[in-house]
Image: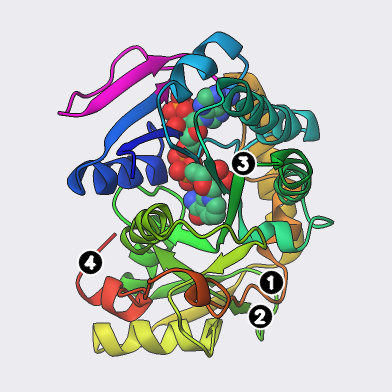
Amino acid sequence: MNRTVAVTGVTGFIGKHIVEKLLSRGFVVRALTRQDSTYTADNLIWVRGNLDDRVALTELVRGADCVIHCAGQVRGSQEDVFTHCNVSGSLRLMQAVQAGGHCQRFLFISSLAARYPQLSWYANSKFIAEQKLTAMASDISLGIFRPTAVYGPGDKELKPVFNWLLRGILPRLGYAESLLSFLHVSDLAEAVYQWVIAETSETTPFELCDGDIEGYSWKRLQEIGSRIRGNPVHLIGVPLPLLKLAADVSMLSHRIMRKEPMLTRSKIRELTHSDWSASNFHISKYINWRPEVSVERALRERLF
Ligand SMILES: NC(=O)c1ccc[n+]([C@@H]2O[C@H](COP(=O)([O-])OP(=O)(O)OC[C@H]3O[C@@H](n4cnc5c(N)ncnc54)[C@H](OP(=O)(O)O)[C@@H]3O)[C@@H](O)[C@H]2O)c1
């Protein structure tokens, strides 16, 4: 097996863990970056550019046997922002892979959100990218991962929620009976590594979660928090109008700062959806992967 893998999104939360995993297993990694300063490591080759830059993408995939496409737009104030990166950028990368004529495998890090494209701009962009990549892949072996909410060192989104939970307060978004699922980033990085070495050609999207078959209700998270604290956790429902107001304020403040917001009304529809349970049933038929970190363990051992 060729030991060179090209990876995008390496400067982000998940991509960094994937690269560390691949380097630790002896792979040479070619990594796309649009940042000035990056770290150095043996067997890590930086390629400067972004998903709009065809020359950089050609250079990224040169000599690589496999591409892990982890770069993605996760925040944005309008649909175009997501489409531009998650759809057009992904297709441009696939075109570079096909034009290069060497790389045989392409793993797209999509999202569980793609299960419900109608919910948000983000979900829809991931769903469309999955569809278009599948149609385009031809003789490239395409894998699609749909991870649920990912957390762990470097994450900024779930970390505050878990910190509040350990302090005794759990803000509830959406319905009391909603089901959630989670995945520790170390387990996701291991799944990527196992996909690379398994050489499966299955293209149906793989859901990934921590393997908890019940899914996490808000009440269950509250109970886990209470057990770890040895003290009660207060579950506080956040009213939808308040969430929408927070989204509008966030949109406005980010526009002033010229940054893309995470919290928008589009994102709220996704966050408050009632069923985010997930299953590893499909993926476990194709790759040798079993997640190891449950939410309870992560909270107890502060693995985030
Ligand atoms: N976090 C989760 O819970 C979760 C769950 C399911 C799926 N995912 C997916 O996992 C992937 C990584 O998510 P993350 O949480 O690690 O996000 P993140 O921390 O925001 O990282 C995103 C990465 O993508 C890069 N990127 C974005 N637009 C790009 C462009 N046009 N050209 C080149 N690089 C670009 C960013 O580069 P810069 O550093 O230069 O901005 C960064 O390296 C995304 O595709 C996301 O949809 C995440």
Magenta span: 32-50
Q: Residue at x 19, y 43 (%)?
A: 26
Q: Are marks 3 and 4 in contact (CB under 8 Å)?
A: no
Q: Residue at x 64, y 61 (%)?
A: 205
Residue 234 placement (x, y as % from top left): 45, 81
Reading the chain from its start, which is encountered first: label 3 or label 4? 3
Alpha carbon distance from label 1 to label 3: 40 Å
Alpha carbon distance from label 2 to label 4: 25 Å
SS class, disc 4? loop
Outermost residue to the left = 42
* Residue underneath mark 4: 302
Alpha carbon distance from label 1 to label 4: 26 Å
Magenta stretch, main secondary structure class: loop
10 Å neighbourhood of mark 3: few (<14), some, or many (≥20)? many
Question: Callout 3, which amino acid?
Answer: Ile
SS class, disc 1? loop
Residue 81 placement (x, y as % from top left): 71, 29
Alpha carbon distance from label 1 to label 2: 7 Å
* Residue underneath mark 1: 174
Reading the chain from its start, which is encountered first: label 1 or label 3? 3
233, 261: nearer the viewer? 261
Quadrant of residue 297 within the rendered picture: bottom left
Q: Are marks 1 and 4 in contact (CB under 8 Å)?
A: no
* Residue underneath mark 2: 178
Q: Are marks 1 and 2 in contact (CB under 8 Å)?
A: yes
